[in-house]
Amino acid sequence: MVDPDNQTSHLVAPVLEQLERGSGPFSSLIQQLTQIVGKNSLLYDADELLVYECDGYIVDKSAPDIVVFPTSTEQISSIVKICNQFNVPFLARGAGTSLSGGCLPIGGGVMIVLTRMKQILEINLRDRYAIVEPGMVNLHLTNALKGTGYHYAPDPSSQGSCTIGGNIATNSGGPHTLKYGVTTNHVLGLEAVLPDGSVINLGGPTAETPGYDLHGVYVGNEGTFGICTKAIVRLTRDPEAHRTMLAVFQTISDATRAISEIIAAGIIPSALEMMDQGIIQAIEEAFHFGFPLDAGAVLLIEVDGLEIALDEEARRIVEICNAHNVREIQRADTPEERLLIWKSRKQAFGAIGRLSPSYCTQDGVVPRTRLPEILEFIEATSQKYGMRIVNVFHAGDGNVHPILLFDERDQDQIQQVMEASEEILSKCLELGGSVTGEHGIGVEKINFMSRIFNETDLSQMEKVRNIFNPRQICSRDKVLPPHGEKSQAAVSLSHPGRRAPH
Amino acid sequence: MVDPDNQTSHLVAPVLEQLERGSGPFSSLIQQLTQIVGKNSLLYDADELLVYECDGYIVDKSAPDIVVFPTSTEQISSIVKICNQFNVPFLARGAGTSLSGGCLPIGGGVMIVLTRMKQILEINLRDRYAIVEPGMVNLHLTNALKGTGYHYAPDPSSQGSCTIGGNIATNSGGPHTLKYGVTTNHVLGLEAVLPDGSVINLGGPTAETPGYDLHGVYVGNEGTFGICTKAIVRLTRDPEAHRTMLAVFQTISDATRAISEIIAAGIIPSALEMMDQGIIQAIEEAFHFGFPLDAGAVLLIEVDGLEIALDEEARRIVEICNAHNVREIQRADTPEERLLIWKSRKQAFGAIGRLSPSYCTQDGVVPRTRLPEILEFIEATSQKYGMRIVNVFHAGDGNVHPILLFDERDQDQIQQVMEASEEILSKCLELGGSVTGEHGIGVEKINFMSRIFNETDLSQMEKVRNIFNPRQICSRDKVLPPHGEKSQAAVSLSHPGRRAPH
């Protein structure tokens, strides 16, 4: 949903145009960046840049002009200072798993890829924190903690590839958000390179720090407040035990009512995920877990805690499911069976690849009690557009993830995906919800911001953005809609690596 | 620890001086404010202002020139606009229970007292939130929820008098913070009048809202970002059951080791409070609960959750206490016994009134594992100054509250309290902790800020403060140390209600 007329703001355009005129300034930029990172840590060849022209949100594309792979805070600070000097936009990228175009380099510029900064700098079990670099893959941290009795709680579905830095940028959630909270609840402090190249430290290893909660506002900035270079994250004690169940329901509305009642009973499951008929069929086709193909919905329910409490909690959950016409409940009796149940959920996205060449995972929130309405609306939208939409989502949080199946080679289908998405998200708002639970605004949902917030609200956000990022050359044109006069048309650096944004 | 030379910033001094010259502008200000709130909702007589010259931090005093009692957001917005027009400083006050001078009207001006805005505007149990006015007393919200199965989790020791607005300003904690988190974890959204009089809405009833987390940075602003006029707070399900215990230890170090081991065992008590020998003796003298006077420390330990799990958790806690030479454990077997145990903790501050004419409750944080060291240091400081210091605090969080006993009529003792406090807080920093866990910086700890944060950090905080409060006339000279040239000496409005700050 990027407006191509707005892809380059008037703030940086003039200098980009200057760079375009001759190869001198561009070569000079390359040369200076090479001095910092070395020639093996820099790309500017068209073919090599292709990989970086989009992230998990494949609807919009825009390649960077240069990609660098720094290995330290100091290098990032120097790179950022040079970008400022050349007035060239820049942004950070982790694994590129953003589903809202958060890593899209609008108007080109320098992309700072953090995947070589993936070290654990400290693990402190007594005071329960770890200090990690931003390019660390989420799951690798939890793997490194195996056997210590601790783990890092936020677990996005993409945790096998997404990075801690990206999680911080988007304030990621995951299946265990319901009980353990989102990323901001697990970040105690951080170091960041601000958009002017200075280095700042926010928060620290003790839970409460004096002064304003800047690390709180930093988490979820979607890359627009600079580049996080170190994170102090909270470690969570592993629960003593789990009870994991799959409950098969005839209808979505039975499943939803069961969810409401489980929560109302004062049970906080560590995960409460719903898969609808479409996704059940896709998973079944791909992996043959043995799900009944005619079921309306399957709930994955997990409780964790002390061994002694869990049987009682599980018993109550079964009782509630029974009261809502559950067809069948499978219980994991061994750790292997638990892993198998989770595999069905975590591989859901993989299964979709068998259904369709492309898919767009949407992200909306409704009050938990409005789940049946939004799911009905999604079904109606699917029929209206003749487009298959399947659902797998964090039901306990009311966070829906309709997955729209399409073929990205067909421009009409891309248009339809955008329209259908807009309708679904508008319905979420109408039901008292929100247009993003965890994927962020990015470029995708920027036009929703002025529908959600009034001018005072947006202006206050803009003021906060501007003190971090006054020139708006760091992760440009994300989160907040541009305003004032229409900015100039997109321009590009005149070198072979540059692809026009589309 | 206010530097009297800094009590009026150069920003507002000239206009205050103008007001001082004649009674015209001052009368005009009174007249305009009266038009908004009515003459029964405005004070400016010297005797009546006396009550508002300090809050729970009695070391510094400074009376406002005018006190107003608005009843709506619109009134507050108008009052703030008038203050801007007259260039007169203003600040909000709830119950005035701040322990760090958060409600001190530095340089006088208009105090906006929120105690008449104490309504519950909505209770929504299905979606688990309440909307309340800022002057609502914390405990009144929980009382209003009795019988619904829900409560408001943050429970400062002053919850019988402190207000939700004040809790939001200081991001208050309480005994149940260990399990349930601080105020920011329970505020979903808010409405505020910004320091220029405009009205802003941040966050909302659904858990995650798009855009920057401004309501996150707003919580804990200590009144410097404007005046919160409505709060959407999360309601927490009442636990099914509790197990409450008092464990009597011979030494503080045994008690501390027991705490560390309870947490390490993966048990998260809903409260884990420590009282030292001094406070035990004071409580015993006042209320005769039957505590042994020679005990080194008493732990109040509470676990909550599902009935079936609690006996096992309690058994483990007893086992751990036994392994650390506990002398005796009392268990509450009935709700009445539980209330009695809590009474001993909650009335601790009342008991201190019997020991000393005045006391200063300090607020420091250390990593939990460093508790024995800080408590030894507090004891040494007590001996050094010949000043009695007793301790009652949130041990599970490492949040100490040494209570320094003195007589405020003796200027030398005030000086000693300030010096001893500074030494204790410096030690907290040295041990890797912080100078405030929950009471805030206020005016009391402002000089610590430049010891904790470097220039970049402070400058970033200042930039954030300045976008909310660019003229710094809202709750002046709080949180961040003034910098640049020394500001002018304090001036005052020339009317009988004005007392010179001291």
Image (tube, coloured by chain):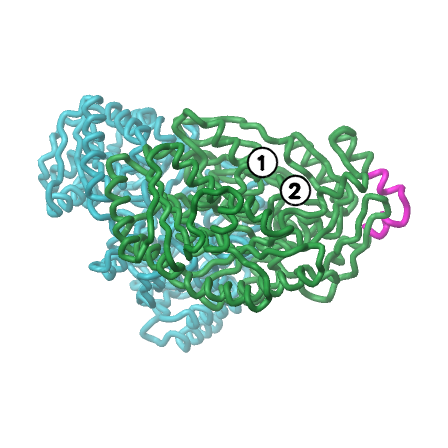
Chain colours: A green, B cyan
Q: Secondary structure at mark 2?
A: strand
Which residue is located at x 64 percent, y 61 percent?
A: A481
Which residue is located at x 40 percent, y 50 percent?
A: B184
Q: Which residue is mark 1?
A: A134
* Residue type beneath disc 1: Pro
Q: Chain of mark 1?
A: A
**Residue A16 forms part of the magenta stretch:** yes
**Residue B431 forms part of the magenta stretch:** no
Instruction: Give the camera-side residue of A81 and A343.
Output: A343
- Report x, y in % for residue B282: 16, 37
> Which mark is first along the chain, 1 or 2?
2
Is disc 1 on the same chain as disc 2? yes
Instruction: Give the camera-side residue of B171 and A409.
Output: A409
Q: Residues within 10 Å of mark 2 (few under 14, many from 20)?
A: many
Q: Which residues are magenta?
A: A15-29
Image-quadrant location for residue B145: bottom left
Taking A40 as reference, is B147 left or right?
left
Q: Chain of mark 2?
A: A
Q: Are marks 2 and 1 in contact (CB under 8 Å)?
A: yes
Q: Which residue is mark 2?
A: A92
* Residue type beneath disc 2: Ala
Q: Main secondary structure of the magenta part?
A: helix
